Amino acid sequence: MAYNWDEKPELNITPLVDVMLVLLAIMMVIAPNMIYEEKINLPQSSKTKTLSKIPPVHITIDKDKKVKINKDNFELDVSFQDNFFLYSKKLDLKATVLISADKSLDYGIVMSVLAAVKRAGFVDVSLATNG
């Protein structure tokens, strides 16, 4: 039998690809379930300091320009900023302030209340919307 030296052997890689895809699928299923755990001895914290929940400050402005801060009523006039500044002395400045205003009010009125809140020293201020 004569051997033809002109023929080149072909490498069939289809079985190799099939095996690799099966191994890849197995790794994709197993990998998320593997848990790496390292034992760490954490230091003890001090138990003397407790976190206190600061109650938020609710400011409501109705369509008649009546301002209600928590349960106290104020008039929205020229002296409102000074009155709010004095009132804010008994509040915690780290508290969240939520301003709710009637949608028929002028934008400038709401911004003047917001400016008074900022001037008093509050940092976390939100405008409430109906949504």
Image (cartoon, helix red, strand yellow):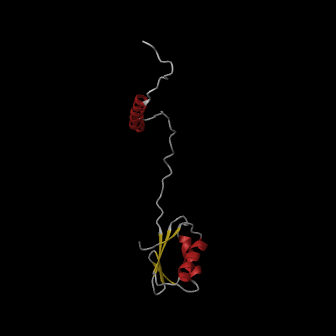
Position of residue 70 in the picture relative to residue 120 (left or right): left
- Please say if 56 is above or below 22: below
Task: Residue lying at the far top in this picture: please name it.
Answer: 1
Task: Residue lying at the far front in this picture: please name it.
Answer: 2
**Residue 85 visible, this orientation:** no
Q: Nearer the viewer, residue 8 or 19?
A: 8
Q: How many marks?
A: 0
Image location (x, y in percent) of residue 24: 42, 34
Residue at position x 45%, y 83% from top? Answer: 62
**Residue 55 visible, this orientation:** yes
Q: Quadrant of the N terminus?
A: top left
Image location (x, y in percent) of residue 107: 53, 81
Q: Quadrant of the C terminus?
A: bottom left
Image location (x, y in percent) of residue 30: 39, 35
Residue at position x 46%, y 87% from top? Answer: 64
Residue at position x 48%, y 55% from top? Answer: 51
Task: Residue lying at the far right in this picture: please name it.
Answer: 119
Q: Nearer the viewer, residue 119 or 19?
A: 19
- Please say if 96 is above or below 105: above
Image location (x, y in percent) of residue 120: 59, 72
Q: Nearer the viewer, residue 93 or 117?
A: 117
